[in-house]
Each structure stands twice: as C-alpha cells, then as structure tokens.
C-alpha cells in the first residue's frame, strides 16, 4: 500500500460544497447553502466551500444536515 501525504483528519461535521455550484449570495453567507433562503440570514455553519470559505445554512437545513450525519454515524457503528 502506498503512503499518502494527506493527513487523516476527523471530518464528521464538515460538509464540502462545490463553490462553482453556489450562487454569490451563498458563498458570501447571505443565503442558505442548501435552499437559497435569504431571510432570516443563515447563521448555522454547514461546512466549507471548495475554496475554503465557511458556508452557512438556515435552521431547517442545518437540522437536515445534522440528522443525516447522525444517521450515517449510526449506520457505520451498526456495521461494525
């Protein structure tokens, strides 16, 4: 097996979004990165863009992301 120069980091709560697929408002944090809602201004950090900037989401979409991460972790633990 080849050695990699990429560090193994814990990324369980980081969702990466393709910056090319986002609107300017989403990249700037003025709109939810998932549903495009602008009001109320998204305040929950969902992850990062492919360019490294933080992305935010509305309360509802942040809840969906948390539920997805939780079910994925539960499924992974059950598989072992």
Image (spheres, grey):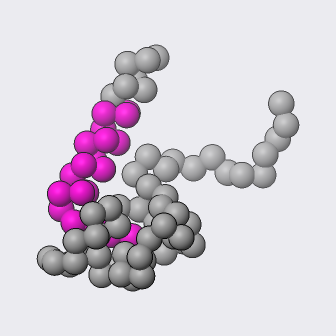
Q: Nearer the viewer, residue 3 or 18?
A: 18
Q: Residue furthest left?
A: 40
In the rendered structure, the answer to whether residue 60 lies left or right of residue 34 reads left
Task: Decide if residue 47 is in sight here.
Answer: yes
In the rendered structure, the answer to whether residue 55 lies left or right of residue 37 reads right
- The answer to whether residue 69 is magenta is yes
In the rendered structure, the answer to whether residue 15 lies left or right of residue 9 reads left
Q: Nearer the viewer, residue 14 or 17?
A: 17
At x 34%, y 42%, the residue is: 69
The answer to whether 43 is drawn above or below residue 46 in the figure is below
| Occupied quadrant, residue 68 | top left
- Residue 33 in the image: state x and y as whole percent: 35, 67
Quadrant where the image shows the N terminus: top right
- Residue 66 in the image: state x and y as whole percent: 28, 48
At x 44%, y 55%, the residue is: 15
- Give the magenta part as a residue range: 55-73
- Residue 57 in the image: state x and y as whole percent: 28, 66
- The answer to whether residue 2 is magenta is no
In the rendered structure, the answer to whether residue 2 lies left or right of residue 55 reads right
Q: How many marks?
A: 0
Q: Main secondary structure of the magenta part?
A: helix
């Amino acid at each position: 097996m080849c050695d990699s120069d990429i560090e193994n980091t814990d990324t369980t709560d980081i969702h990466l979004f393709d910056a090319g697929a986002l609107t300017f408002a989403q990249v700037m944090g003025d709109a939810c990165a998932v549903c495009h809602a602008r009001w109320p201004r998204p305040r929950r950090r969902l992850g990062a863009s492919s360019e490294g900037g933080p992305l935010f989401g509305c309360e509802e979409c942040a809840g969906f992301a948390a539920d997805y991460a939780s079910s994925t972790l539960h499924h992974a633990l059950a598989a072992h």
